[in-house]
Image (tube, rainbow, N blue to C red):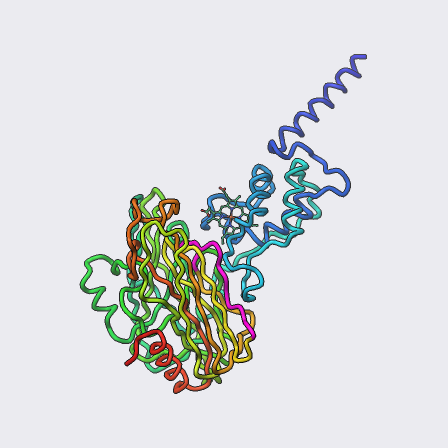
Amino acid sequence: MNGLRVFALGLACAGLLAALAEPAPGRRATAAPGAVTYSKEIAPILYKNCVSCHRAGEVAPFPLESYQDAAKRARLLAEAAATRYMPPWKPEPGYGEFRGERRLTEREIALLQRWADTGAPRGDAADLPPAPTFADGWQMGEPDLVLKMPQPFTVSADGPDVFQTFVIPMNLPRDEYVAGYEFRPDNRRVLHHSVSYLDNSGTARRKDAADPAVGYSSFGGPGFTPSGALGGWSPGASAVRLPEGVAQPVRRGTDLVIQNHYHPTGKVETDQSSVALYFSKTPPKMIAVSVPLFQRGLDIPPGAKRHRVSASLTTPIDIQVISVTPHMHFLGREMKVTATLGTGAAVPLIWIKDWDYYWHSQYQYRTPLALPAGTRIEMEAFFDNSADNPRNPNDPPERVGWGSETTDEMALCFIQVAVEKSSEAAELRSAVLKQLGFAR
Ligand code: HEC
């Protein structure tokens, strides 16, 4: 009798202890046969799609590295996945196939849902895949040139976002061809995104010298017309390599100009980010050049909910489109870029239906898109300048035109293309500027 009671008590305690050992949502210590478990189905989804940002020292607000991390938020994860709020990926499917695409499959979304609905069971530890590892060093091996911000930049604990531009002399002994690029953020807590430009006019140096701070302040761009752009970084972005045989010429004497966007964290932070460059060892078969497609006569009336803007250009030469970089500010809501061939066939380049300045990035095609001479590329953008737009910097809304301040707008898409000769690059650039109303 006594023995039995002790035994029963022991069982109850074991049950209680097991229950206590599990976080609240994971009440089930053992999963029913065939159940969706963390170890078997969920960890692989999180490791592949979420942990790059949801880990210590990264941009996301909490880690998703362990069972506990995930189980206590099972419902929230399922919702963020179902609404496609997470992982953050702006381009619409079917409008361009991009490298590094971050999209869950319908099946993965259903698994997260099912897991949350069934109490987030852990499952068998033997099913758990190895935890992902993240390269500490440069992702593409030893760079040919590493360029670091000359001094650390200090961001105050609070206050508005800071847009700061830094000039880094490249000191190239000769002209080079850049085939690969990687931006390495130094302080991922405070750095939101970065864009790298090139300047061979000395303008950025002069602006830097005129501003007593480390670097100089500018929002929409580097504050002048750069001679080129290298790429950008936003959370989760990886190193960029141009397609085989393609490289971007960089002249001796060029400065690297990086524009960083910092979001105060509540603590004083410093950042001293760097950029790695990989040069082409042999002269490239094709050279990369970026052309802007934009509508500069912007005039967005106050209160307009869906103000439409469009611009187009026709390429005078055969091109291969490598990447696109849409750019708008806080009133921008949507941008679509489409190419129409001479035959009338349409090639979708990109469509961002839910523009968010904070997630803007350069989108590189899995394989370059060949567009013959005579192809027309059209950009269509929509702006919400009503009081309903929570990001509207003006309260009440005001008339907004083109400019580089937070309160100005831009309707712009950089189109990076590969061409065979530098004479073609020049021809393309001048044709584009002429068509957009900058005839010289
Ligand atoms: C590219 C970086 C990145 C990736 C990849 C990513 N997240 Fe996030 N996540 C963030 C950031 C940044 C936030 C902060 C919220 C924001 O966007 O303002 C966030 C917030 C969240 C939130 C909180 C949402 C809320 O309402 O508070 C959830 C849940 C979440 N992520 C789940 C996921 C899941 C699940 C995945 C993978 C399927 C994922 N995230 C992948 C960066 C990322």
Which residue is farthest right? 1
* Residue 153 visible in the shown view: no
Q: How many marks?
A: 0
Pinpoint residue 254: horizontal percent, then vertical percent: 31, 75
Magenta highlight range = 345-360
Q: Is residue 362 above or below residue 57?
A: below
Q: Is residue 419 above or below residue 208?
A: below
Q: Is residue 117 above or below residue 164?
A: above
**Residue occupying image coordinates x 51% and y 60%:** 91
Please tell me in which quadrant of the rendered image residue 4 appears: top right
* Residue 417 visible in the shown view: yes
- 358 and 250: which is toward the camera: 358
Please tell me in which quadrant of the rendered image residue 206 appears: bottom left
Q: Check residue 136 for magenta coloring.
A: no
Q: Is residue 101 above or below residue 189?
A: below
Pinpoint residue 266: horizontal percent, then vertical percent: 34, 42
- 359 and 193: which is toward the camera: 359
- 359 and 275: which is toward the camera: 359
Pinpoint residue 37: horizontal percent, then vertical percent: 68, 43
Pinpoint residue 92: horizontal percent, then vertical percent: 54, 59
